[in-house]
Amino acid sequence: MKKMTMGKAAKVLSMTALAAGISMANAADTIKVGVLHSLSGTMAISETTLKDTVLMMVEEQNEKGGLLGKKLEAVVVDPASNWPLFAEKARELLEKEKVDVIFGCWTSVSRKSVLPVIEELNGLMFYPVQYEGEESSYNVFYTGAAPNQQAIPAVDYLMNDIGAERWVLAGTDYVYPRTTNKILESYLKSKGVAAEDIMINYTPFGHSDWQTIVSDIKKFGSAGKKTAVVSTINGDANVPFYKELANQGIKAEDIPVVAFSVGEEELSGFDTTPLVGHLAAWNYFMSAESEENDAFIETWHEFTGDDKRVTNDPMEATYIGFEMWAKAVEKAGTTDVDAVEDAMIGIEVPNLTGGTAVMNKNHHLSKPVLIGEIQEDGQFEIVWATDAEVPGDAWTDFLPESANLISDWTAPINCGNYNTVTKTCGGAAE
Amino acid sequence: MTAYARFSLLFLSLFFTAPLFAEDMETASAETVISDIAEEKTLQDYLAELTEAGFREKEELVLKVVETDEPETLPVMQALLEGDLYYVKDGNTLVYKTSGDPVTVFGGETMTGLGSRDIKKISVNNSLRTLLRAQISRVELFSKNPQTRKTAAINLLKSADELDPALLDEALSQEADAGIKEILLLVEGIRQLESDDSAVRLEGITALTGSLYPEVRGALSNFANRAEADGNGKELAAAEAALSKINAMLRFNSIFENLYFGLALGAVLLLAAIGLAITFGVMGVINMAHGEMIMLGAYTTYVVQQLMPANPGASLIVSIPAAFLVAGLVGVAIERGIIRHLYGRPLETLLATFGLSLILQQAVRSIFGPLNRSVVTPEWMAGTFEVNPALALTYNRLYIIIFSLLVLAMLALVLKRTLFGLQMRAVTMNRPMASSMGIRTGWVDALTFGLGSGIAGIAGVALSQLTNVGPNMGQSYIIDSFMVVVFGGVGNLWGTLVGAMSLGVVNKILEPWAGAVVAKILVLVFIILFIQKRPRGLFALKGRSVDMG
């Protein structure tokens, strides 16, 4: 009896899922936009917002009359923070749903999992999150920051404007922090920082007990030199980390912490009063003053029906990616991947922070870099910005294995990892 | 002498800091400099300029504001530091704004009818805050309140070398409080390290020996580096002797610190595991949804706090019974609805409760949204209890250690001293016998499961003060909880206490030299080996239930 009810429940569930799929696949003459963001599991906290952003953009585009005279239709799937499932869902989107473009992924490991599928089926994906670089695929456009658009300028700011001489590189134990810290370590050493003035620390995902590490940072910082913490701590671990910083009384004036994964949304989870002055480096802050930004925030509040919802950098990256794709489709007059890929390069879209974002030949953007200080209301006060847009560098110059590599997806090079010394494609295959 | 009159003394001190800002001065436009000479500017003028200046210009302006020495000067600077200084966009009127309506700086009138878009904060950055804090400390060094004076003196340790000696001498001669005087002598000591006279520098080293302030250690190690570079052997030896004495004291401190960290982690583990000690330990139900009970407790805290936003302290107290009830009732419902049908089938129970945990997570995600919720920490839980300048115990951990022990004691009382506790023990030890004695075993099962779940809910209240309140928060505690219960001995509360505390302390002792990742691995390996040797954990429960397994 019990088994029956459970079986029935499962059937009902799968039927509703099917029904949803069918209703989406229904209309024939639409342009399909795949959304590949986790709506459950650990990454749901960050990725759900991006799903909503894409839906908002689709709705807005449809109000403007769609693209090429067709309506846009969003196809949402849930890869559930499960990396192999990302690949399966990407295949489902491309083979079964036949989407024209995918907006998706957050963590690097999910992107790496999707990559072979997208390349095999010649799909098109926009990846909207800051990442460690060392990659450039024909089928992916990277609208988030490469290390030279976030990490390196942030370290420059701390070094030149704050006078930091001693460095703590703290991160979560996975590919993005490890690669970023490797780049930063080699960059710092090239600037003459001694090895004993760099402390590197890794913690597991979702680490919640920061007592020892924060106390170590405090001790490391009391050696007479100005100390700064560069944090690549990801996701949920940030809240207990910042709470511990506040409780142990580490003030931004003494030991500033600059974070690469903490934005408005992460801060909305707690009281930021004790954290005023700690920093974050992004290409966008909600507090940026521009007409585009005001309009974007207003639309977002209208779309979500909640005027407390914050906006953040990956949302801007999604916005820029979507606008660029729409422009490229108009320009190419088709949604064919190769034509759109060709049209994408050189496309310009206004940034929400003012200025213009340009898509470069290496599938990365030129964007401004901003440094903000955390305020009591959970927003950032922009204290520093680059004078001009910084072009994203797919292959960092600060690691020996990628120093000679460039990416250029235009003729005659047409290669994601072109070695400028040996003049061959495929220097370090990825 | 009023505190404000001290500003005239600051004039002198400015003379010493001036070269530091010389560079910035040059960047200031020529007109400003000329107009400065042409007429005496007032505090109002400088503050008006403050509303439009960039961060660099603000630093200069703050120094000029300091010179004005008006009654409003100190409060304005404090408000600027705290981020409470705003201006009305229309007309540039300066106002203080905290929670209510803005109050004008000059005149103290309350302005009504202004929306949040009508006023704009005068923003400060870290270097401005450092500057402001140093300047304010110089004034507050002469405050009537000893606590304020102490904070000011500690702040001055950071900028000791830029301080005017006359100001410091006067403060030293007036200071009656021995503790504050000691700090001021350290400030003087740091200054002496900068002296041109070798004898004075050695005097400075002697003055600094034995102090645990991080600034003192910093100043000494900088001094040692300089002495080494200059080849000054005698001073280097003296500085290194002083440093090694400080380091020895710090090592001694860090033993206590690690022990405290370990107990604090143990308390968190204990809180997370007590509930499981009942549902898994006593009843034998492998409850994978245990973490979600913790999450429900944390969300209850959030909801209660939303209902009474004015009083975070009281709301936290109210949350304790509320979370117990919410999680407890959900627990009873789970037992009646699902687990009751699965007794004796551990695999099915595991699967069913695992599925349940996913359902609960997604339910919370749908109701509250996927984002973390912010639970405010009441004032009395923030900050640290300072044993000495290098050893500070955080209050929130201190309260959680006490709280976890209280919860354990309450639970022990319920089990040993109440009728329900008696029935519960009877049912777990010998179900048929208890049943034949007239105990409604079904109800006892439901209530026991409810009790375990309710306690997990209480744990959620405590954890909401330490970590995220989000749909996934329970998952991070489920493994740890099972680890503690299995290690401590199934069905034994003392085992849970000893297990949690020892795992916490071992973890924290390993962490400084092995790193967080490896420390956790080592602890898990240790437990695996331990369970091989003693499958029933630290304190095995003896009795018939063991045979019935």
Image (tube, rainbow, N blue to C red):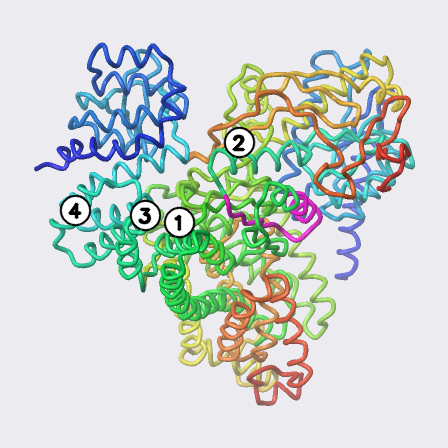
Q: Type of residue at label 1?
A: Thr
Say whether marks 4 and 3 touch (CB < 8 Å): no
Residue designated by label 3: B194
Circles 1 and 2: CB atoms closer than 8 Å: no
Place of residue A294 in the rendered image (x, y in percent of width and height, measured from the top left): 53, 18
The answer to whether residue B369 shows anywhere in this view is: no
Pair 4/3: label in front:
3
Say which of marks 1 and 2 sits in front. Answer: 2
Amino acid, disc 2: Ile
Q: Compared to A84, does B395 lie above or below?
A: below
Determine whether label 4 and label 2 are within 8 Å by CB. no
Location of the N terminus of chain B (image quadrant): top left
Amino acid identity at mark 4:
Asp
Label annotation for residue A248:
none
Give me the disc on residue B169.
4
Q: CA distance from mark 1 to mark 3?
A: 43 Å
Q: Amino acid at mark 3?
A: Glu
Question: Foreground residue, A274 or B349?
Answer: A274
| Relative to B368, B230 lies left or right | left
Residue occupied by mark 2: A371
Numbered range of the magenta stretch: A165-184
Label 1: which residue?
Answer: B377
Q: Please check whether the numbered discs 1 and 3 fall on a single chain.
A: yes
Measuring 56% from the left and 61% from the top, which residue is drawn there? B331
Q: Earlier in the sequence, mark 1 or mark 3?
A: 3
Chain assignment, label 1 = B
- Identify the element where label 1 is drawn: loop
Q: Do callouts 3 and 2 mark residues in contact (Cβ within 8 Å)?
A: no
